[in-house]
Image (cartoon, helix red, strand yellow):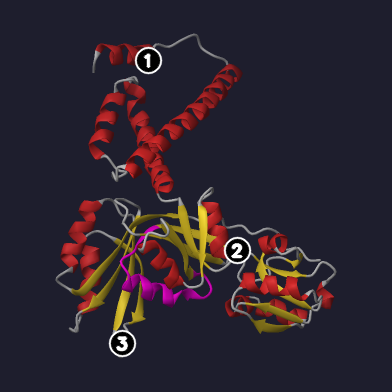
Amino acid sequence: MNRTQDTAAQSCAKPGKPLTLDEARTEIDRIDRQLAELYQQRMQAVEAVADYKKEHNLPVLQPDREKAMLEREAGYVAPPYRESWLRLLREILALSREHQQRKIHQDVVAYQGMQGAFSHMVSKTRFPGARLQNHPTFEDVIQAVLTGQADCGVIPFENTNSGLVGEVLDLLAQYPVYIREVIDQPVEQCLLGTKDATLKDVQWVYSKDQALAQARGFLEELGAQPVPYPNTAMAAKYIADAGDKTRAAIGARENAELYDLKVLSTHIMENANNTTRFLVIGREPNTEGSRFSMIVTVKNEVGALGRIIETISGAGMDMCSIQSRPRRPYPFEYYFYIELADFCDQAQIRTLLAGLEAVCGRIKPLGPYNRQEAPKDPEEKETC
């Protein structure tokens, strides 16, 4: 520790005049306001660093610099607070890296569907200010990412009611893209009608087949006939164009504003915690993350799948999901999607993959990534 650091640490350690409870709380509030302003200034500087790294194709994570910074900063705080100060700094560094990743990869975002689709809304919320680029199919989104038309893509991967989107999993197995982030998005489906409609007027309800199935009980009680439509956003637009109060659509609340419709009823799904998991995909893998996914094929040997699971367990990994998928065009052969939680670093990944090479036919890492949790409590149901 140099003399400046030593003096700073000692000055922090000197007790002052005891404060009353109210004085202490007032002082904490004042310091918190300063911290908020300084945090914003720091993140603005982080954005400038991200711009430089993107221009010069540099990695976000710089381990040597972070290590040197932590060693230097430790000297600015008195010993009683030093360990907690370093914990706070490590968290700030992690948030800074995450912000850099977002800044670097948010210029153009590809999604499947049309304006008002859930993929569009997730893209808009997750990447504010980015140029959003819609595509008709999931494969088109992946191709846009691979060819450089888009910096990243947003595609649905799994739903709490209907499970994995098999087509997306097949595309992940086929193309050299990686999962950069996972977003768990609550799905609030509403019944949308024309401005002059009431629930009693509705006789036909249009939407994607999964949305109709998830609202089966509501539709039976309403006495309306379900009509399948390619997706929820298209169904909402159809109702707006038709202008018929006997027809309604199941879709997101945002579609009511987008297509000048009326929300006739909210939270009409049988599962109140209906959530869809979206993937943010990119051309390059992350260097860190709390989760790790991969796709593997199993050798045609007795006990091969069991040895894969044993290898994962032996490496100290927490396997939170394993799902099979038919391996086309090979009849009755399968590949497996495996998701691991509480992952640490690249060294762990290399050790695990080295162990799996002996028991797997093919391994495709999808990369380490972080997951955003969805809020749990839905709003109260409303009807019109």
The N terminus sits in image quarter: top left
Is residue 116 shown to the viewer in this render?
Answer: yes
The type of residue carrying mark 3 is Pro
Amino acid type of the residue that numbered disc 1 sits on in the rendered structure = Ala
Q: Which residue corresponds to mark 1?
A: 13
In the rendered view of the protein, which quadrant contains the C terminus?
Answer: bottom right
Does label 1 or label 2 sit earlier along the sequence?
1
Q: Secondary structure at mark 1?
A: helix
Verify CB contact (< 8 Å) between mark 3 and mark 2.
Answer: no
Left or right position of 34 against 228: left
Label 3: which secondary element: loop
Disc 3 versus disc 2: distance between alpha carbons? 35 Å
Q: Is residue 189 above or below residue 13?
A: below
Residue 115's mark?
Answer: 2
Residues at discs 1 and 3 in contact (Cβ within 8 Å) = no
In the rendered image, the residue lying farthest to the bottom is 331
In the picture, measured across the screen, residue 284 lies left or right of residue 370, that is left
- Read off the residue under disc 3: 329
- Say left or right for 32 vs 283: right
Measure how far apart labels 1 and 3 are at the Cα level. 70 Å
Residues shaded magenta:
159-180
- Give the x, y percent position of residue 126: 51, 52
